[in-house]
Image: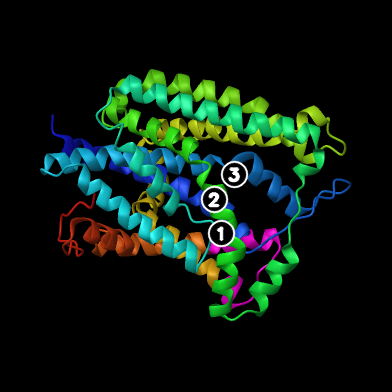
Amino acid sequence: MNTNLLIKERIGTIDCIRGFALLGIFMVNLPIMLGIFTPFEKEEVTINQWIEIFLNLFISNKFFVLFSFLFGLSFFIFMSRAEAKGYGKKLFARRLFFLLLFGIIHRLFFWTGDVLLLYAVTGYFLLFFYNRKPKTILVWGVSLISAFIILVHGLAGFMFLNNPSLLYGSFHKEAQIEAYHTLEYADWLIWHFNAEVLTETPEHLLIIPLLLGIFLLGLYTGKIGVFQHIEQFIKPLKKIQAASGLASIPLIGLLYYCQVAKDPIALIKAFETLYLQAGGITLSAFYMTTLMLLLRVSFAQKVLSPLRLYGQMALTNYLTQTLIGFVIFFIMRLYGTIALYESALIFIGVFIVQIIFSNLWLKNFRLGPFEWLWRTLTYGKRQKLSKNKGDIAI
C-alpha cells in the first residue's frame, strides 16, 4: 500500500478541518489578546454578552480540541513519511525542538496564550506511543481525557461548592491595562515576564495530561486508517456524530443555564467548568465527524475549499494572528478598550485577509513562510519553496 499516495488523497480533508479549527481558535483568542472584559448584567443581556455566550457554548474549548486532535494525527503522518524516507524518531524530536523554540519566542515576546510550547512539550510523550497497538493508544487516550475531566474539573466543582467566591476569582485588570497602555516595549517585556509568563505558564502546563489524551486519539485514527480509507468508516463516523451531538445537548444546556440564570442553583453552577470541558470534547467530535462526512460531497468541497489552504498554512496564520493582535493591543495601545462586537468585526476582517493571502501564496509556493522555516530547520537543510507547475504541496 502506497502511504504517500494515501496522504496526498486525504490531506485536503485534514487541512480543511485544520483551517476550520484555526478559525475557531482565533475567534476565542482575539478577545483575550485584546483584553476584552464583558461584565455580565443578567437584567438586560447586551449584544456583547450574547456574543460571549455564543463563544462559550459553541466555540471555547471545542476548536482547541479539534486542533489538538489533528496534531496527534499529523504526528502519525509525519512519522510514517519519515520512516519511508529512512528517518527515525530523532527527526520528530528535532521537529518538536524547533516548535518549542517558536513557542518560547512567541510566549516571551508577544503573548502568553501561545499553544506551541504546550504542543512541543506534550508531543515528546507521543514518541513513547508510536509503536503501540491501536487499542492501547485508544485506552490511554480515553483514560487520560476522562481522568482529567473528572478529577480536575470534578474536584474543582466541589471546591467551588464549598467556597462559591472562587468561581469569580480576583483579577487585576487595571494593572494590566496600565502596563499595556503606558510601558515601552523593553519595560513591558519585564512586566510581561513577571506578571504573565511566570504566573500563567505553570497553569497552562497542567493541561498536558488532557492534551496528550487528545493527541493520542488523533494518533489512533491515523493508526487504524480512518482518513486513509474514510469510506470504510462511514457507519462508525455517523454513530459518533449522532452520539456526540446528543451528548452535547445537555452539556450546552447546563452551561447556558449557568451563563444566564439570575440566581443559578449552586450545585449546578459549581461544575460549570466541567460542562465547558466535557462539552469541548463531545462537540468537537460532532464538528469533526460532520465535516468529514460533508467533505465527501463535491459541493461541500468547493464551498469549504478556502479553508483547506488556510489550514495548510496553519502555523503561519496562527503566528500572524498574534502579530496582528500585538499591533492592536500594544502598538496601538487599545488593550481593554475594544468591545466584543468590535472584536468580532476585526476577526472577520483578519480572517478574510488571511484566506485571500493563503490562497494567493500557495498558488506560487509549496509551503507557508513559517511552515517552510520549520521544515528547513527540522531537516537541517534549505527546503524547496517555489512550486513548479503540477506540484502538490503536502
Which mark identifies residue 60?
A: 3
Image-quadrant location for residue 359? bottom left
In the rendered view, tell whether residue 12 sits above or below residue 174. Answer: above
Which is more N-terminal, label 1 or label 3?
3
Whether pointer 2 and pointer 1 mark residues with C-beta atoms closer than 8 Å, the reply is: yes
Q: CA distance from mark 2 to mark 1?
A: 7 Å
* Residue 52 place in picture, x, y as percent: 69, 49
Looking at the image, which residue is at 42% across and 28% down? Answer: 141
* Residue 266 place in picture, x, y as percent: 82, 31
Q: Amino acid type of disc 2?
A: Pro
Q: CA distance from mark 3 to mark 2?
A: 21 Å
Apparent side of residue 280 relative to residue 363 in the rendered image (left or right): right
Q: Amino acid type of disc 1?
A: Leu
In the rendered view, tell whether residue 357 sits above or below residue 46. Answer: below
In the rendered view, tell whether residue 241 sits above or below residue 65. Answer: above
Apparent side of residue 1 relative to residue 224 in the rendered image (left or right): left
Q: Which residue is mark 1?
A: 198
Image-quadrant location for residue 181? bottom right
Q: Which residue is mark 2?
A: 202
